[in-house]
Image (cartoon, rainbow, N blue to C red):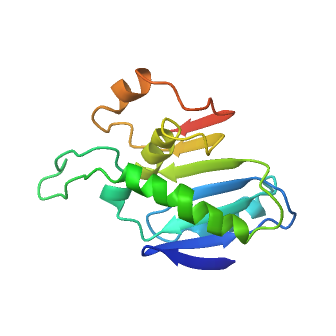
Amino acid sequence: MNSFSVEQKRVDVFESAVPNKPVIYLNTYGREGEQIFQYLTDIGCQDFSLVAVSKLEWNHDMVPWDIPPIFKNGASYTSGADEYLHLLINQIIPKAESLLQGTPAWRGIAGYSLAGLFALYSIYQTDTFSRVASVSGSLWFPGIKEYVVSRTPVKKPADIFFSL
């Protein structure tokens, strides 16, 4: 594993044993990347590299627009998704992929909860990712349904995975 930081975000790179394999970008609440990579390796998933980004400002970096708190005494949600996506595309991905052997066969983006919302939102903003996994994505987020049905992804992804 290689690690680096970009603007206080921690990036852990778990490299495939073979060059030119797919790379998945996983936005995490904590530092679950190593556990997830190990688990997927143990169950025999196809060989891939995993780039796990942590130390995110969860209610900011993963959120496409502002909404008030949804829980009493909860934090507001402030629109930081576009800013974070720019950081991911322009700084994190180039640095992470410079640490990998070869060129990724394809890029995917995955996330749980608000990071699942962000993964879905990202394909409407960029053609960087050809696979998306929104795992228990926060599709309750006000306005996301209307946003998705009124737009087209920048590039149609090869696969989209949703779980509840």
Q: Which residue is drawn at 12% across and 53% down?
A: 72
Above or below, comparing residue 163 to residue 8 in the picture: above
- Where is residue 34 drawn, in percent x and y? 63, 71
Q: Residue visible at 58% across and 43% down?
A: 133
Return the residue found at the far top.
150
Q: In which quarter of the image is the N terminus?
A: bottom right
Image point (21%, 44%), residue name: 67
Question: Looking at the image, can residue 8 be seen?
Answer: yes
How far across and down, in percent of the image, does residue 22 sit? Answer: 76, 52
Q: Residue furthest left?
A: 73
Seen in the picture, residue 137 relative to 111 is either above or below; the reply is above
Percent x, y of residue 28: 49, 62
Q: Residue furthest right?
A: 18
In percent of width and height, residue 132 lies at 59, 42
| Quadrant of residue 147 within the rendered picture | top left
In the rendered structure, the answer to whether residue 16 lies left or right of residue 113 reads right
Q: Residue at x 69, y 33 (%)?
A: 158
In the depicted structure, whether residue 149 falls above or below residue 29? above
Q: In this view, does 66 lie above or below 94?
A: above
